[in-house]
Image: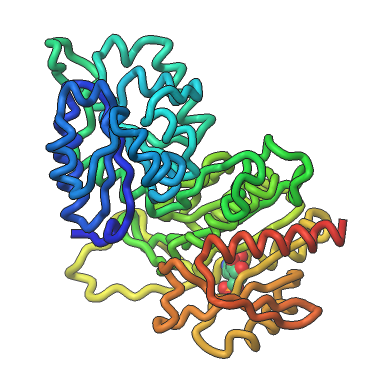
Amino acid sequence: MSTTLVGKRILLIIGGGIAAYKGLELIRRLRERGADVRAILTKAGEAFVTPLSVSALTGDKVYTDLFSLTDEAEMGHIEMSRDADLLVVAPATADLLAKMAQGLANDLASTTLLATDKRVLVAPAMNVRMWLHPATQRNIAQLRDEDGVLFVGPNDGEMACGEYGPGRLAEPLEIVAAIEKALAGPTFIPLPGSVRADTRLLPAKIGKDLPLAGKHVLVTAGPTHEPIDPVRYIANRSSGKQGYAIAAAALAAGARVTLVSGPVSLLPPPGVNLVPVETAREMLEAVRTAMPADIGIFAAAVADWRVADAGAQKIKKGAEGTPSFSLVENPDILATIAQDKARRPSLVVGFAAETEHVVEHAKAKLARKGCDLIVANDVSPESGVMGGDRNRVHLVSASGVETWPDMDKDAVARALVARFGEMANATA
Ligand code: C5P
């Protein structure tokens, strides 16, 4: 069983509806995977499951409107909404979705959903006509496309009311999988204003005075996959986390962001323009298409080589013995863009992942590639950087070397973006 949920804090909002009992099953599935679950039961939810059964499964008290005054004294709904890593609404009724889309806050669940700075995953469940109603569809489009809310389900099937169609709550294990996926990416959502200094992930629309307002930032991230044949490929261990965190931080700093990403299991930060690619050559093409940019941040772990003649059919074991491959060098995307006099962004940043002599290699790379700054890090297996959540970087530029302390990748991203902003504005 995967360990991605160990120690994660999920705030589960159980709405009303016959599917509420599956919320109980969801709590069990999450807890057996090591997650901490705190539950809010709406008034409508209480008609279907009891607070006692919810609290027996979470091992915590259950939060309802009835108790909200005493709860508020112990832990305010604001704190409760921020304390979680993810908010999950299951089942999400048409009423709850409408409240979320409108920003209503007239009970504990809707107030908490409005106050949170974390991502929200909803698992809708309702009658098929209610789901298909233009009002519900409008609300869903608003939540999904504008507000960055994540959805799982609903599934098609027979309803408790005897009708058939979309509206059945996703199965608990499907919701668990969606939760794991949501938690793999950045968990903060954009917040307007300086509500809290450490969560300044602002959408580009807000705040013309932000450091990167009006700038187009291009970020490459993740690994590339280089095919051997239609089913096999050469890859590397890059998770894309640092690049995705930089894209989120650049967006927060007011930029328009294009994220050209190799295959990763992360959700793109809401609001960035994601261009998914597989190979190095596709990545170069996508980068060229996305130009012009004011700042280019090349954080992808691009495969240095590809197989010369990737087979059009699956290579079979047998008569011809063990296959051997010849490799050809991939285009260097960073060097190509940094040395393109006509279209070079005014600030070009490269990354250097090394297992030894980190700073020396980074200095050589700065000159060889023609970029303004190299962010270098140690990716030796003992550093835990590749695929991990933390990073310790050295900034290597013409003005010298700076070594930053070990920080989580979101904090590194925010600090880097602040620096890119200073550099870009100095050269503008
Ligand atoms: O040469 P090396 O792979 O160590 O350089 C790393 C830097 O160059 C990273 O910024 C990476 O994104 C970029 N790069 C690239 N295209 C390649 C290889 C590396 O953009 N083919």
Quarter of the image where the N terminus is located: bottom left
Where in the image, quadrant-wise, is ligand 1 located?
A: bottom right
In this rendering, the answer to whether 312 lies above or below 213 is: below
* Lateral position of residue 313 relative to residue 102, left or right: left
Looking at the picture, tell me which residue is in the foreground, 402 or 378.
402
What residue is at 46 percent from the left and 30 percent from the top? 144
In this rendering, the answer to whether 327 lies above or below 272 is: below
What residue is at 48 percent from the left and 32 percent from the top? 114
In this rendering, the answer to whether 298 lies above or below 103 is: below
Numbered marks: total: 0
Color style of the picture: rainbow
* Lateral position of residue 136 relative to residue 299, left or right: left
Q: Is residue 1 visible?
A: yes
In this rendering, the answer to whether 241 lies above or below 294 is: below
What residue is at 70 percent from the left and 45 percent from the top? 254
Residue 111's image quarter?
Answer: top left
Q: Is residue 285 visible?
A: no
